[in-house]
Image (cartoon, rainbow, N blue to C red):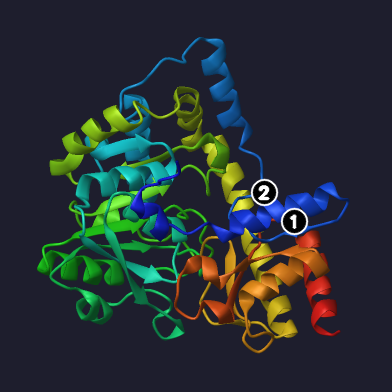
Amino acid sequence: MYRPAQRLADISPFHVVELLTRARQLEAEGRDIIHMEVGEPDFPTPEPIARAAVAAIEQGRTLYTQALGLPELREAISGFYRERYGADVPASRIAVTNGASGALNLAFACLADPGSEWLLTDPGYPCNRHILRAYEGRPRNIPVGPENNFQPTPELLRKHWSTATRGLLVASPANPTGTLLTRSEIEALAAVCREQKGHFLVDEIYHGLTYEGDAPTACAAGDDIWVINSFSKYFQMTGWRLGWMVIPQAYVRDVEKLAQNLVLCPSTPAQYGALAAFEPETIALLETRRAEFRRRRDFLAPALEAIGFRITARPEGAFYLYCDCSALCEDSFALARDLLETAGVAATPGLDFGSHEPAKHIRFAYTTEIERLAEAAQRLKTYFSR
């Protein structure tokens, strides 16, 4: 008897993962595939982090930690906010989580009542709305585009807020566009959420990967804002599944109870490894890699525009270019499939990111060395000149 929960009908597959599966099949058949689809740094985890984790395992430090994480790691994250942003974020408000996804699971488990409505940007990271649905919340999309740098505004927020709305989730830098919110824009959105007596959640997992200066943290805009971050992107620990969340003080005990029951604690070796993430040696290496991501962005953007793609967002952060491909095709999903099969270039169709003009957009990740990006640009040029 097959009888899944009704919520499964509202949870779509993650198309980029299915494209990646097909890409791996083609590689197994001997095809050369250039991967520009998955949002994962191609650099290995920095050696100091790996050494610290190995040392922890060798010393037998593999038992459960506190549900909210190692106290010394929470203190280290607090210090990171103080040193990088000048923000006072007490360790008592920080929860170490099983990746940023684990943080968002805990946040929505804490805040989302059945049927409650939450505002999310469209386009936006697809798993966010599906995690919300798993906790019986209802995602409501705010269409955003180049006219507002693919970010919500107070006017859009008031327009879409309803009596059922309980909060807003934004990302800065955003996926798939790489756009940022300024400090004043964050404060303006927070003001509307307070005016409406709603919650404000900010995804900052691409902080550190910005190319015209550091992004402002929402932690500096009020201690009532939920802020989610990760060791995956800037710190290049994707498979370690470790992140953190800054929680309004009144909710810390609620999140702790949920963490105790849902996950027990984050990975212990990963946490000991992460203690080395903030060491000067590690940060120096990460900064050289940030410079390399900028070099790739500055190479790939004009190369794609020369082919006929339009980059209508200002890609200030993350490692994506969200392109308008309407001059080249009618359906980006069909294009992504054909590029993979015909040209050996894997990219992500707009369909993954929402329902606002998905057919005319495609995302390219510059998470491979620049020589491969040049080869990809040549393959795309040949493909469209057929």
For image coordinates 82% across by 78% down, the residue present is: 383
For image coordinates 78% across by 75% down, the residue present is: 380
The reply to whether callout 1 and callout 2 are in contact (CB within 8 Å) is yes
Tell me the residue that label 1 is attached to: 369
Looking at the image, is 81 positioned above or below residue 48? below
For image coordinates 38% across by 18% down, the residue present is: 64
Residue extending farthest to the top is 59
Residue extending farthest to the bottom is 327
Quadrant of residue 26 within the rendered picture? bottom right
Element marked by disc 1 = loop
| Circle number at residue 267 | none
Q: For the residue carrying disc 2, how many other residues have a C-alpha within 10 Å: few (<14), some (14-19), or many (20+)? A: few
Q: Earlier in the sequence, mark 1 or mark 2?
A: 2
Tell me the residue that label 2 is attached to: 42
Q: Is 334 in front, or is 224?
A: 334
**Residue 376 at x, y percent in the picture:** 78, 67
**Amino acid on which the number 2 mark rests in the picture:** Asp
Q: Quadrant of the C terminus?
A: bottom right
Q: How many marks?
A: 2
